[in-house]
Image (cartoon, helix red, strand yellow):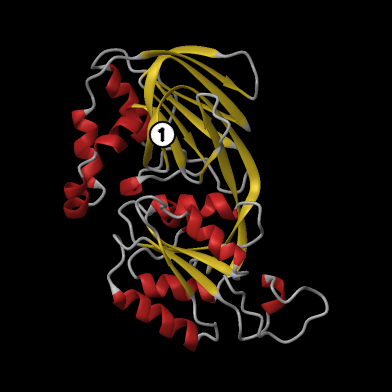
């Protein structure tokens, strides 16, 4: 792809780098958009006009496909030397773009179009108006957040997540949520799937934090959080922060049907605390080994089944261009 090198000469940085365009009216954004989530040409036209009025060059518009949900488009944007890559879509689009941007120094921007929009919610961003969200990107400042890298079943490839990952019950909900209900009911569709998935057998698990001696449990689910809030405003990990360099883990191990009452009390109770059914851990890395394969999800995307999961946090690996919400 041809690069845009019409900026004034800058002796402190090559003209193709984002740093060279800061302070000029030639900064350029790339928009990686999920066309299934977007509202047709109206959004594209609105963002074109927005960039023009805010002193940015015409954005690079890159649509995702079923075969490539965002990684290839993000790489194309990086190669074009843009100043920010805006992920316009749901949590899956955000995750794919972030996987490419982590460690590059090129910031991510968020235009939420999905059902969950979990990263945007945890950052306190506007999820109701895509154009307003884009305005906040173009006029924002950079902040850094942690990313978490995960390997399933000793794979050579690491996958990134920004919000939460889950093994077992949590992931089964994500894999079995009815898309039609998501369109009609939003996050309540996950509640419906959760009720259907309540019956099930626990699996033996060894969970090791930071290489320490593993704890042994009969689990229904293990959740790993980089931040605390999920759908419906429920705060799974009250102490989790996006930039603390720490992972938060939750083990759900209910015994029988009444055990789920302990899960509810441990997660949703006014004074969150460990119960016989719920345990919390923190660390910089974790390894989970299961007796039988379980479903696995990253930021709400079902990515398969496995018996082994290795995760580690990379502190401050991703820049986000955003306007901080007002304090209340």
Quick one: SS at disc 1?
loop
Specify the quadrant that holds the N terminus. bottom right
**Rendered location of residue 52, percent (x, y):** 48, 87
Seen from the viewer's position, the closer of residues 112 and 272 is 112
- The image shows residue 292, relative to residue 128, as above or below, that is above
**Residue under numbered circle 1:** 271
One can see residue 306 in this view: yes
User: Which residue is rendered at x = 30% and y = 30% of the image?
Assistant: 172
Residue 201 percent coordinates (x, y): 29, 14
In the rendered picture of this protein, how many numbered marks are placed on residues? Answer: 1
In the picture shown, does residue 217 fall above or below 28?
A: above
Residue 269: in sight, yes or no? no
On screen, residue 6 above or below 231: below
In front of the other: 251 or 117? 117
- Residue pictured at 78% horizontal, 81% vertical: 10
Horizontal and vertical percent for residue 117?
A: 38, 54
- As drawn, the residue found furthest toward the front would be 1
Label 1: few (<14), some (14–19) or many (≥20) C-alpha neighbours in 10 Å? few
Q: Is residue 85 above or below residue 146?
A: below
- Is 113 or 191 nearer to us in this picture? 113
- 310 left or right of 113 in image: right
Q: Residue at x 31, y 13 (%)?
A: 255
* Residue 202 in the image, given as x and y percentages of width and height: 33, 14
């Amino acid at each position: 792809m041809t690069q845009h090198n019409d900026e004034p000469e800058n002796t402190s940085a090559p003209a193709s780098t984002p740093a060279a365009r800061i302070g000029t009216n030639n900064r350029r954004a790339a928009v990686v958009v999920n066309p299934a989530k977007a509202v047709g040409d109206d959004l594209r036209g609105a963002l074109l006009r927005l960039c023009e009025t805010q002193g940015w060059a015409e954005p690079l518009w890159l649509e995702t496909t079923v075969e490539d949900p965002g990684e290839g488009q993000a790489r194309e944007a990086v190669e074009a030397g843009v100043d920010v890559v805006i992920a316009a879509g749901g949590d899956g689009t955000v995750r794919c773009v972030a996987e490419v941007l982590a460690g590059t120094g090129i910031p991510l921007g968020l235009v939420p179009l999905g059902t969950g929009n979990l990263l945007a919610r945890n950052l306190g961003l506007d999820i109701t108006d895509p154009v307003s969200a884009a305005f906040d990107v173009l006029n924002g400042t950079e902040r850094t957040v942690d990313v978490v890298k995960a390997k399933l079943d000793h794979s050579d490839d690491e996958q990134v997540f920004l919000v939460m990952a889950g093994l077992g019950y949590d992931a089964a909900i994500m894999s079995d949520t009815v898309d039609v209900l998501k369109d009609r009911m939003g996050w309540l569709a996950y509640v419906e799937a959760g009720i259907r998935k309540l019956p099930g057998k626990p699996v033996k698990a060894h969970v090791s934090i930071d290489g320490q001696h593993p704890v042994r449990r009969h689990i229904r689910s293990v959740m790993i959080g980089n931040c605390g809030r999920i759908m419906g405003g429920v705060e799974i990990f009250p102490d989790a922060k996006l930039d603390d360099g720490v992972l938060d883990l939750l083990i759900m191990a209910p015994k029988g049907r009444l055990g789920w009452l302990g899960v509810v009390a441990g997660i949703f109770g006014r004074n969150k605390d460990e119960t016989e059914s719920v345990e919390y851990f923190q660390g910089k890395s974790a390894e989970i080994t299961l007796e039988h394969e379980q479903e696995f999800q990253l930021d709400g995307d079902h990515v398969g089944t496995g018996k082994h999961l290795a995760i580690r946090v990379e502190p401050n690996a991703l820049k986000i261009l955003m306007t901080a919400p007002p304090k209340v």
